[in-house]
Amino acid sequence: MNYIRIFLFLISFSCHSQVVNIETLRKPSDSVKWTGSVSLDVSLIKNTNDIFRIANKAHIQYNNNLNFWLFVNDLNLQKIEDNSLVNRGTQHLRYNRRISKKIKWEVFAQGQYDAISEIGFRGLLGTGPRFKLSKNDNYRFYLGTLIMYEYEKASNAIPDRIQNDIRGSAYLSFSLYPTETISIISTSYYQPKIDILNDYRFSSNTSILFKIFEDLAFKANFNFFHDAFPVSSAVPKTQFELTNGLLYTF
């Protein structure tokens, strides 16, 4: 494997994006076909409250320049006493097939739950082309235009709410490497319902990496998510997350 994430989170607050940003997980691998990363954090704190947190993140990638496979697993549970502050999980599988130097065809499947957003289960299945808009290795721009089927079942707090929808999923992504020590990766998604365009989701993710030493870097990540029609009126339309941390590679 190219590298393993040893320590990632130092500061984390607010909410999160419900759209997986695959661009931050695509690893260039000219000679190594298999790459991946794994992290596991477990915390148990006893003071005036009982605080428990467990987070697991893993991704595995295979790339032979013609075929690209990526699997992502992301689980996060944070509880104070019997109250869940965060309880969510996502599994994502994606396949790319190279059509030409500038075009790939993508297929993906995703399952997720999010108790805070009152999502009991959301399943996605989508496909569409991905276009490479630039050739410069230091400044990479991509455009994806996909169509996807969505099955969504609300949590037990909202019984009998099930939706089956067809949505578009367009994204614009760029990766910038202005110097040898700075990396900037950003992706924005727009996902409207095909028959009701004002029912849409917008998500933006930006990661900035500053290399401190050869194998150690500081990473800042910002997620923004807006859902025009969330599962219920109790769920905020806009959520965001800011994380800062260290990334060690070897």
Image: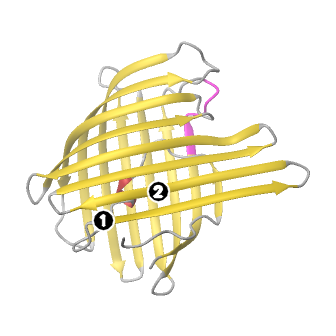
Is residue 237 part of the magenta span, yes or no? yes
Residue 58 vs residue 94: left or right?
A: right
Residue 72 placement (x, y as % from top left): 41, 51
Determine the residue positioned at 28% across, 35% down: 126
5 relative to 40, above or below:
below
Q: Which residue is mark 2?
A: 58
Q: Which residues are magenta?
A: 233-239
Residue 75 placement (x, y as % from top left): 55, 47
133 relative to 201, above or below:
below
Q: CA distance from mark 2 to mark 1?
A: 14 Å
Residue 165 placement (x, y as % from top left): 35, 22
Q: Nearer the viewer, residue 250 or 83?
A: 250
Q: Does the image show residue 53?
A: yes
Precedes in sequence: disc 2 or disc 1: 1
Q: Which residue is mark 1?
A: 34
The residue at the far right in this view is 48
